Amino acid sequence: MTDDQFEEFFEPYAGNVQGFYEAPFWTFSDALVRALMDKHLGIQSGQHILDAGGGTARWALWAAEHFDVDVTVADKSEKMVEEALKNVAESPFGKRVTVVHCDLEDAPMLADESFDAAISTYGVLSFLDQPRAAFDTLARVLKPGAQGMFMSHSLTNAIHSKLSRDGVTPEELETLQNESIVRWAPHVPPLRVFSAADLQDLGEQAGFEVPRVYGVPLFTYPGPEDFGYPYDKLSLVSHSLKDQKFFDAALAAELKASERPEWADRGVNLMVHVRKPSNA
């Protein structure tokens, strides 16, 4: 992905991303991500958290309120940083959020061992040219014993979606299988996709312990309408998830399934859980 492709994508996306997650499927996916963070990160009140590739500060503001912490948003996109600053200024929790314009692959402005935990949601890792360099940054800035949960697009979901829903040429399929690169739509730049083993390896190469990789979600798949913001039609799954009892039952099923590491690669997205060794 070139720098021009990166900026051309985020220029219009930044102003719409908040609305994109209003579809019931993405509300459900958010709830699963939050439940996994609650369960596994061990964040305590008063700590300092890094939101790596935090975009418009949507997750940073949630974390500041939910965990009672200070959060630094680090993002490469100038337009996303502009939106983050607006959202932070308008939020009652904005005083607890700092926004930094930087590239995770080389971020000297983020101090060594300065964060108690780190998060990175949805496709941030998939936009990286050098994911190993970003993992090295994350390992450098986390304190010994600190944990992180970082998300990417899933290789198996990309193959499944292209073959069964989106359509794919033989050439695209070969690139996807051999290079782990997917093109979701003409306006979306080529993105990296990962297997659970890929994320495990990246974490370990950076010196992390890797307790688990999670699929997010594992069984609840978005319909094509869930990518059609602004939404004028609900997908079948989003329609079902509007019912709170169904929502709660599906979330319980996903959380139970998340304990099966052999199922991780089923995920729409993947989330790797890492821990920096205490003696690092």
Image (cartoon, grey):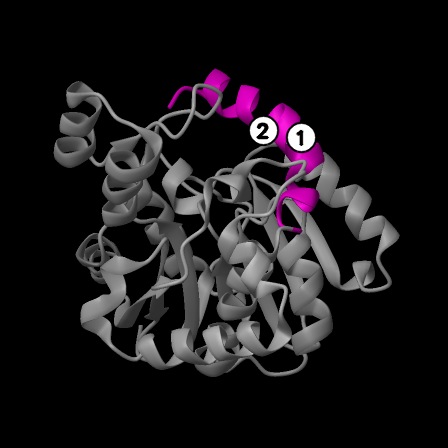
**Does residue 117 appear in the picture of this structure?**
no
Q: What type is the residue that disc 1 sits on?
A: Lys
Numbered mark located on residue 79 in the image: 1
User: Which residue is labeled 2 in the image?
Assistant: 10
Q: What type is the residue that disc 2 sits on?
A: Phe
Residue 107 on image: x %, y %: 48, 43
Label 1 CA crowd tier, 10 Å (few <14, some 14–19, many 20+)? some
* Alpha-carbon span between mark 1 and mark 2: 7 Å
Which image quadrant is residue 203 in?
bottom left
Residue contact between numbered discs 1 and 2, judged by CB atoms under 8 Å? yes
Q: Is residue 46 left or right of residue 239?
A: right
Residue situated in front as seen by the camera: 7 or 246: 246
Residue situated in front as seen by the camera: 142 or 32: 32
Numbered mark located on residue 40 in the image: none
Q: Is residue 241 magenta?
A: no
Q: Which quarter of the image is occupied by the N terminus? A: top left
Residue span colored magenta: 1-22
Q: Residue at x 27, y 39 (%)?
A: 164
Q: Is residue 245 left or right of residue 165?
A: right
Residue 239 on image: x %, y %: 58, 57
